[in-house]
Amino acid sequence: MTLKPPTRQTLVEQVVSQMKTLIKSGQWPIGCRIPTEPELVEQLGVSRNTIREAVRALVHSGLLFTHQGKGTFVRSNSELETAILRRVQRAEVLETLEVRYCLEREAGRLAALRRTDDDIGMMKKCLDEQALAIEKNDINCFLKYDSDLHHAIAKASQNRLIVDLYVHMSEALRNAIEYVQHEEDIAAAHFSTHQKLVEAIVEQNPSGAENATHDYLKAAQAALLKK
């Protein structure tokens, strides 16, 4: 392959770049409707076709989505998130649980070494809310605080890449959890192992945190294989 001199960015690429900046900076937050096509034409001084191509590119990348009759909205502020989500959505639930094991085992181990008092407070709050959800047989509430607990553990690891990966995979991971924990007895067993995980983190016992992670994910895999 022969290298060629780089070419200048096209108008479409320049518009895409500016729109990405607005999305990633939060000036166009997730869920907001972006300016209409005529407004973008006026603001950017380019043709309608250029705007349409730029929007189409951002829709394809997963940053925007269009709602017929309502406009175009921001779906995500991260191309990494949408790429991971698309890939995880194609994965089998068992594969997703295996990835969870790799990610959460290390997050738990590091959290046991690096957690702060604030981290512990958040984890205990999540456990308390999960306990209440089990009493009420509210699985949706249980899953919400299960997700919050794992976000808290990832944050306590003080590894920004682990945090980013967990955030970007959170929807798919929640779906995997929900698939195998729709019954009260399964949720209760899951809660018990999470108590052990948090106890290990509080006691700064990294091997205990790894063992607890192994126990609850193996239980989830066993529940899946029974289906």
Image (tube, helix red, strand yellow):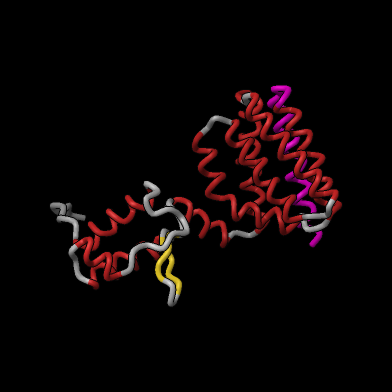
Q: Locate residue 73, reporting x and y percent.
A: 43, 63
Quarter of the image that includes the N terminus: bottom left
Q: Quadrant of residue 2?
A: bottom left
* Residue at (73% x, 56% y) in the render: 140
Q: Locate residue 180, reporting x and y percent.
A: 75, 56
Quarter of the image that includes the C terminus: bottom right
Side (left or right) of 46 relative to 113 = left
Q: Quadrant of residue 131?
A: top right
* Residue at (32% x, 50% y) in the render: 21
Q: Locate residue 44, reporting x and y percent.
A: 21, 61
Q: Is residue 158 above or below residue 66?
A: above
Q: Is residue 106 above or below residue 224?
A: above
6 or 60: which is nearer to us? 60
Total numbered circles: 0
Magenta highlight on residue 87? no
Going by the picture, which residue comes out furthest to the left?
5
Q: Locate residue 77, reporting x and y percent.
A: 43, 52
59 or 94: which is nearer to us? 59
* Residue at (19% x, 56% y) in the render: 9
Going by the picture, which residue comes out furthest to the bottom?
69
Side (left or right) of 114 relative to 5 = right
Magenta highlight on residue 221? yes
Dominant secondary structure (helix, strand or loop) of the stretch shown in magenta = helix
Side (left or right) of 96 relative to 220 = left
167 or 213: which is nearer to us? 167
Instruction: Please state the extent of the stretch shown in magenta in the rendering.
Output: 202-227
* Residue at (57% x, 60% y) in the render: 89
